Amino acid sequence: MQDDLQRGYYLRFSAIEAYRRKVWTILTRDFFSRWIPASSTVLDLGCGWGEFINQIAAATKHGMDLNPQSREKLSKDVQFHEHDCSTRWPIADGSLDVVFTSNFFEHLFTKDALRSTLTHAWNALKPGGRIICLGPNIRHLGGHYWDFWDHHLALTEESLAEGLELTGFEIKKKIGRFLPYTMSQGSNPPLWMVSLYLKLPLAWRFKGKQFLVIAERTRQGSRDAGAPAH
């Protein structure tokens, strides 16, 4: 499985690694930084080659992925956890300010695995901590959603938001059309267009194929993976 992860990521992104890094520099600077104070402790869930976590300004950084190759791609200030996110996390409960995840949940095999992952995120976050979720929206992609071998879960902003609420999160922002899709298939606009796009929400309605859902943990306590919220 790890060999597939490494090979798949290499085939998909190695030719555009430098471009992706520049795009994520813009995304973190011009958009995501407003949701992530520089004093935060942040986990990049499904961190890949560190496109997000290497760029974001944060006091403490963690990356979690099953791909062992991630370790060599992450900056020295990122603590890497080679770990199955659907099992108990090697991160202390109530220690994170932000969990960020991009284009990851669709790679989980089942909704049970996703629910367990959301529960572990809830436990690891401080009360008031937030989870920021970016991913392909099957509502706006249709059959193209399945063009990748390792896509298993079909999600929209509504289904993910409901799963987050069932876990105990409070939804703070829900956008069905946010970023376009996808760099791995040759859609690589000039970098100035990326920055401009983020400033034009009207354009999202026409070009956006990925959702953005942001939610907060609002209560004390911890949860067992799979346990219903009350």
Image (spheres, rainbow, N blue to C red):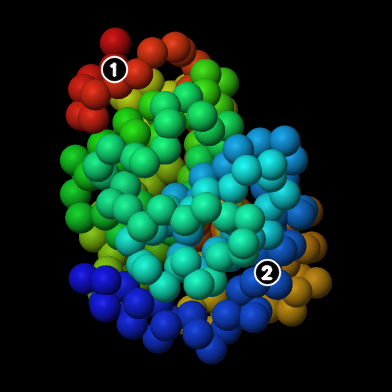
Quadrant in which residue 52 is drawn: bottom right
Closer-to-camera residue (34/174)? 34
Q: Position of residue 20 (x, y in %)?
A: 61, 74
Quadrant in which residue 26 is drawn: bottom right
Closer-to-camera residue (162/110)? 110
Q: Which residue is mark 2?
A: 23
Disc on the earlier residue, 2 or 1: 2
Q: Residue at x 33, y 25 (%)?
A: 167
Q: Amino acid at mark 2?
A: Val
Quadrant in which residue 144 is drawn: bottom left
Q: Amino acid at mark 1?
A: Ala
Q: Is residue 56 left or right of residue 121?
A: right
Please indicate, yes or no, whether residue 173 appears anywhere in the rendered image: no
Task: Look at the numbered disc 2 and give the secondary structure of its residue.
Answer: helix
- Viewport quadrant of the N terminus: bottom left
Above or below residue 46? Residue 215 is: above
Task: Look at the numbered disc 1 and give the secondary structure of its residue.
Answer: loop
Q: Count residues near mark 1 (Cα–Cα under 10 Å), then give few for <14, some for 14-19, many for 20+.
A: few
Q: Which mark is residue 229?
A: 1
Closer-to-camera residue (172/116)? 116
Q: Residue at x 76, y 54 (%)?
A: 29
Q: Is residue 84 left or right of residue 188?
A: left
Closer-to-camera residue (127/102)? 127
Spatial distance from mark 2 to mark 1, Cα to Cα? Answer: 37 Å
